Amino acid sequence: MSSTERTRFYRDKVNGKFLGVSAGLADYTGIDAIWIRLGFLIATITMGWPILIYIAMGMMAPKKPEHLYTDRKEQQFWQGVRQSPTRSAREVKARFRDIDRRLAHVEEYYVSGNRQLSDEIEKLR
């Protein structure tokens, strides 16, 4: 599944109550669905027209694919990407830097006592 499919809005009929719009918004933003439902209810009572937006979203938005995420951690990652792509890119870059640093530490540990292995690694560079 492509990243564009994971970053778009879907109705979540499985976790939804009526059309799945609030559950879809909860999945999209990471905010609990109860707060979104409460916000729609208060906005509808005070203004009246938000119910029309809710119904329009329920009619136009596609249903969420069954296997969009493999686990909860992946779902949280993609919610973070939707909220702030720049921050997510920085976090991924920082993770790679950390992995690189740890690999360099492992390499230094094993190579420092083995001159032949050190020479072989230098030849590969």
Image: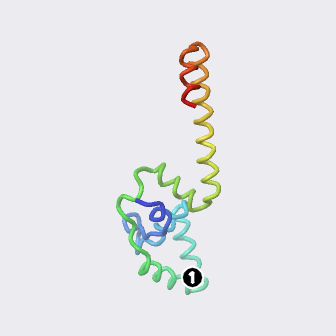
Q: Splitting the image into 4 quarters, where does residue 11 fall? A: bottom left
Residue 111: x and y, percent? 58, 19
Q: Residue at x 51, y 82 (%)?
A: 53
Q: Which residue appears at 40% of the width and 73% of the height?
A: 62
Q: Nearer the viewer, residue 31 or 34?
A: 31
The residue wearing badge 1 is 45
Specify the farthest residue to the front: 123
**x, y percentage for residue 67?**
36, 58
Q: Give 122 or 80, whichever is nearer the viewer.
A: 122
Task: Estimate the x, y position of residue 119 in percent, counting from the top left.
Answer: 57, 20
Quadrant location of the N terminus in the rendered image: bottom left
SS class, disc 1: helix
Say above or below: 45 vs 74: below
- Mark 1 burial class by Cα count in 10 Å: few <14, some 14-19, many 20+: few
In the picture, measured across the screen, residue 62 lies left or right of residue 37, that is: left
Image quadrant containing the C terminus: top right
Residue at horizontal 47%, vertical 51%? 74
Q: Position of residue 26 (x, y in %)?
A: 51, 64
- Against 29, residue 115 (above or below) is above
Is 64 or 19 nearer to us in this picture?
A: 64
Query: Residue at 46% across / 50% down in the picture?
Result: 72
Q: What's the amino acid at mark 1? A: Ile
